Amino acid sequence: MARALQLARGGRYWAMPNPHVGCVLVRDGQVIGEGFTQPAGSNHAEIEALKAAGDARGATAYVTLEPCSHHGKTGPCADALVVAGVSRVVAAMEDPNPQVAGQGLARLRAAGIETECGLLQAEAERVIPGFIARMRRGRGRVRAKLAMSLDGRTAMASGESQWITGPAARQDVQRLRAMSCAIVTGSGTVLADDCALTVRAGELGLPAVEAARASARQPLRVVVDSRLQVPFGARILNADAPTLWCHDEALPAPPLPPGADAQATIETFGLPRGANGLDLALLMDALGARHCNEILVECGPRLAGSLLQVGLLDELIVYMAPTLMGNLAQPLLHLPLSQMADKVDLELADVRRVGRDWRFTAMPRY
């Protein structure tokens, strides 16, 4: 199962919206086939492992997620395991998808196949947290990526912010993008940096095959632009990746410029206003409906603060550079708190060195 979990991570850049799953087939103490989830519409991990084995009769299948039992773009993996003649299936966890939810294991048992579930379950859940979140609450995991100086500043008063962190941290961010289904930013960040928010193979620091796999599927770029300030010449509206352009629904949607690229890659989306701007909860629900498991937020202090205040951030990933930017620079988050009782407590999950910088991963305690 540990090997299956290792294989599962091989699909983290390209399996979405499917969960990335690993499968290992063992017979007489020998591995006879293994595989992981291919891009959506292609083989699931079990099918890849069965193909590699050729003959899987009498084998035990170790799989990181319960084999599916429903017809999607591919057939049920549970049926494929039955036809292949495996004698035992060990799953790390039950599939949280209501279309499966134990039915895959039940189908295997009905066919006379011995089943077990729960081996290394906690480790398996850590491999696909975004998929689990979307299945259980309707929207994926939302993580904010922030970069700051040692004194907690993210940009100079003028808005200048490139580059606070070093090359290793920026490479790490590229990998976060590649693992994401959508990247959310605000109009202020776009106007200040003219960011493209794309995954670039040459900046991932991965082996060539894995880098090509990661950059072949570009995440959906989401721009929160209530007053439609972003100009059409902005790089975030180019044809390198699809873009969802969110604005106040009271405003008419902007007419897209002529040309097949714009019509194919830009979609406008009107949102109602909430107490502190556009309804961000509705946006996250909409991304969940678009099968976005992992949502990465790369934005300025105002949008990040708004997401935190309304309880929409599951995780903060903060890169801290060993530099000072001074008291006139912009803060990490726009959080107008006036009393200690209002402070936001965080649960620190991970701290690690990334090149010359440090990366902190923390979860808000709402």
Image (cartoon, rainbow, N blue to C red):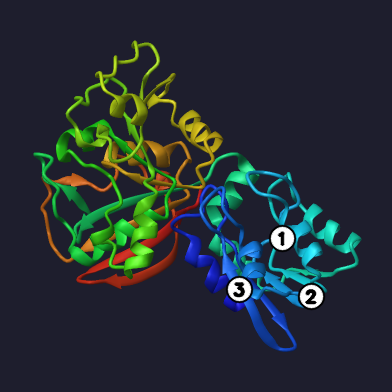
Displayed quadrant of residue 338: top left
Q: Taking 298 as reference, is 1 left or right?
A: right
Residue 338 visible in this rendered orientation of the protein = no
The disc labelled 2 sits on which kind of residue? Arg
Quarter of the N terminus within the rendering: bottom right
Q: Is residue 141 above or below residue 194?
A: below
* Closer-to-camera residue (258/220): 258
Q: Residue furthest front?
A: 54
Q: Residue furthest bottom?
A: 29
* Closer-to-camera residue (139/359): 139
Discs 1/2, front? 2
Reading the chain from its start, which is encountered first: label 1 or label 2?
Answer: 2
Discs 2/3, front? 2
Mark 2 = which residue? 57
Using the numbered discs, state the Cα–Cα distance from disc 2 to disc 3 in whole angstroms: 15 Å
The disc labelled 3 sits on which kind of residue? Glu
Mark 1 = which residue? 66
Confirm or deny contact between disc 3 and disc 1 (CB under 8 A): no
Q: Taking 258 as reference, is 89 left or right?
A: right
Residue 346 position in % (x across, y down): 44, 56
Reading the chain from its start, which is encountered first: label 2 or label 3?
Answer: 3
Mark 3 = which residue? 34
Element under label 1? Answer: loop
Q: Is residue 158 above or below residue 132?
A: above
Residue 107 position in % (x across, y down): 84, 57
Residue at image position (24%, 60%) is: 203
Mark 1, other Cα within 10 Å: few <14 / some 14–19 / many ≥20 = many
Confirm or deny contact between disc 2 and disc 3 (CB under 8 A): no
Residue at image position (57%, 48%) is: 41
